[in-house]
């Protein structure tokens, strides 16, 4: 009898998920970040209005901004365009970028006074291989979501962006549009209920 094997894409997905689970269970978030916002001595507490979270407050987003070699300037340009103090940001350059480019991006984040005040931006310290057409891009985004949950759990929606993206609306307009939506709304589940397919 012929022995059955897993299809290569399923085997790769299982291997990626296992590696991601091991990475998340074994590593603290500070070990994964080149410039974690949480490693230095805690800043003086911001005004109370900035600490308020919940259904009666404006929503907040967690952004995963990824890029590759020579994308650090575009990632920073995108970060400036989507930046809002209520949101959380994680910047990642894949293995195509060098350590010096990641360090320069972390230094640029560290130097900006507004970003330094709110400490809501982190930079992943080590890039890993990401094939934009394969499952590794999804694994990277899931890893980013897990790290964002560990370093700052006060956000309502997760947004993945590439350094090549650029926003069409301001963050204030986006926050206003999402403020009337229920916080537990999942757009993956929401958009799959099309009605006419039944």
Image (tube, helix red, strand yellow):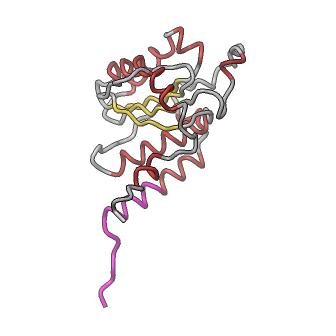
Rendered residue at 59%/27% (across/down): 58
Q: Is residue 54 above or below residue 80?
A: below
Where is residue 72? Give x, y as percent. Answer: 35, 22
Left or right? Give the position of 60 relative to 100: right
Q: Residue at x 31, y 69 (%)?
A: 7
Q: Residue at x 58, y 23 (%)?
A: 37
Is 48 a magenta residue? no
What segment carries the magenta color? 1-17
The residue closer to the viewer here, 171 or 92, is 171
Quarter occupied by residue 47 = top right
User: x, y percentage for residue 159?
Assistant: 44, 36
Compare residues 103 and 60 and report the one nearer the observer: 60
Give the residue displayed 50% in from the left and 32% down from the top. Answer: 178
Q: Is residue 46 left or right of residue 111?
A: right
Residue that lies at the very extreme toward the bottom in this rendered image = 1
Where 76 falls versus 111 (above or below)?
below
Q: Quadrant of residue 179?
A: top right
């Amino acid at each position: 009898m012929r022995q059955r094997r897993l299809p290569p894409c399923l085997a790769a997905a299982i291997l990626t998920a296992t590696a991601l689970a091991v990475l998340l269970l074994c590593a603290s978030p500070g070990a994964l970040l080149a410039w974690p916002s949480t490693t230095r001595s805690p800043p003086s507490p911001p005004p109370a209005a900035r600490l308020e979270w919940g259904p009666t407050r404006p929503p907040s987003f967690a952004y995963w901004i990824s890029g590759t070699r020579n994308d650090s300037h575009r990632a920073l340009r995108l970060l400036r365009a989507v930046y809002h103090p209520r949101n959380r940001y994680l910047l990642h350059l894949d293995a195509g970028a060098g350590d010096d480019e990641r360090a320069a991006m972390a230094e640029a984040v560290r130097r900006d006074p507004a970003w330094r005040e709110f400490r809501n931006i982190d930079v992943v310290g080590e890039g890993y291989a990401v094939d934009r057409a394969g499952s590794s891009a999804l694994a990277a985004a899931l890893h980013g979501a897990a790290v964002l949950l560990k370093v700052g759990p006060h956000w309502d929606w997760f947004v993945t962006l590439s350094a090549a993206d650029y926003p069409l609306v301001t963050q204030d307009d986006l926050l206003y549009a999402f403020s009337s939506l229920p916080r537990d709304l999942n757009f993956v589940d929401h958009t799959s209920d099309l009605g006419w397919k039944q």
